[in-house]
Amino acid sequence: MTSSEDVKSALEWAGLVMEIAQAIGTVMIGLAGFAWSAHEKSATEYNNRRQLMSEAASQIDMDFAMSMFKDRTFEQYSIGEGDFHQILSLRFKFPTVAWHRKCRSRLMVFLETIRPIAHIIGKPDGELAIEGQIDPILFKFRLSMLALGDFWSPQGGLKSMCNDEHREYIREIYGDQYEWHLLCTACSRIGFKGRFVGPWDNDNDDDDPFGKSHTSLEVKV
């Protein structure tokens, strides 16, 4: 083989090597672009979930929860044991005292305001966007559940006028077993696991009752 043929062969090999290098480079650029695109998509989805959580949590009627369950007051009234008995009882469909009825209505509104966030962070499927149990965007939900929890099952030497009838009323007006389990699961994810269950309740925080029905309690007049 002549020197000109050697040069031609070397150039062909060099061209082939360049083509292979370019192909590998193209593939690497494509993979890097795909990885970056996936990262951007994941970050966007995460931020969207954070935004959704923030909007849901911002609607919670925290002031009512703190007032009723922590301070034991409603508007200008102090809530005593007899008042709780009238407000939080399935035996009284229509309390005779006007502010008792109003307080009960506000309680129903409050429970509805916590439902969206309970659905977002209580469902077992999907990825969460919670940054720890004291995530700042969940402060209204956390403080509301702390107030309700201190009333429902007081901790650390606290005392409460709450009894099983009161728990039964709140549990019943909130919703069926599926809804209640979502709320209990959401609470467990912010550090309140087991605070809202009891021996009178047919929901067990360690079970998974999704899809099961909950038999409503009879409302007495």
Image (cartoon, rainbow, N blue to C red):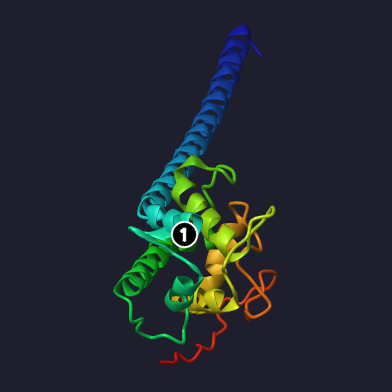
* Picture layout, residue 30 above or below residue 212: above
Is residue 123 at least partly visible in the picture? no
Residue linked to disc 1: 72
Inspect this view and state whether residue 122 appears.
yes
State the quadrant of the C terminus: bottom left
Give the residue type at disc 1: Arg
Horizontal and vertical percent position of residue 104: 37, 72
Task: Please count the marks in the image.
Answer: 1
Q: Quadrant of residue 21?
A: top right
Q: Residues within 10 Å of mark 1 (few under 14, many from 20)?
A: some
> Relative to 68, does residue 211 appear above or below in the rendering?
below
Going 43% across and 61% down the picture, which residue do you hit?
A: 114
The image position of residue 194, as x and y in percent, is 66, 63
Q: Nearer the viewer, residue 167 or 139?
A: 167
Asked whether, in this view, residue 70 is left or right of residue 153, the answer is: left
Image quadrant holding the N terminus, namely top right
Return the x and y of residue 132 as percentages of the image width and height.
59, 43
Q: What's the residue at 52%, 25% (across, down)?
A: 22
In the image, taking residue 32 as reference, residue 193 lies left or right, namely right
Where does the image place residue 115, in percent across and percent down from the top left? 43, 65
At mark 1, the secondary structure is loop
Please name the residue shown 53% across and 89% down the image: 215
Query: At 60% across and 20% down in the image, what residue appears?
Result: 13
**Which residue, as the protein is rendered here, is positioned at the far top?**
3
Q: Between residue 212 and residue 157, name the one nearer to us.
A: 157
To which quarter of the image does residue 65 belong?
bottom left
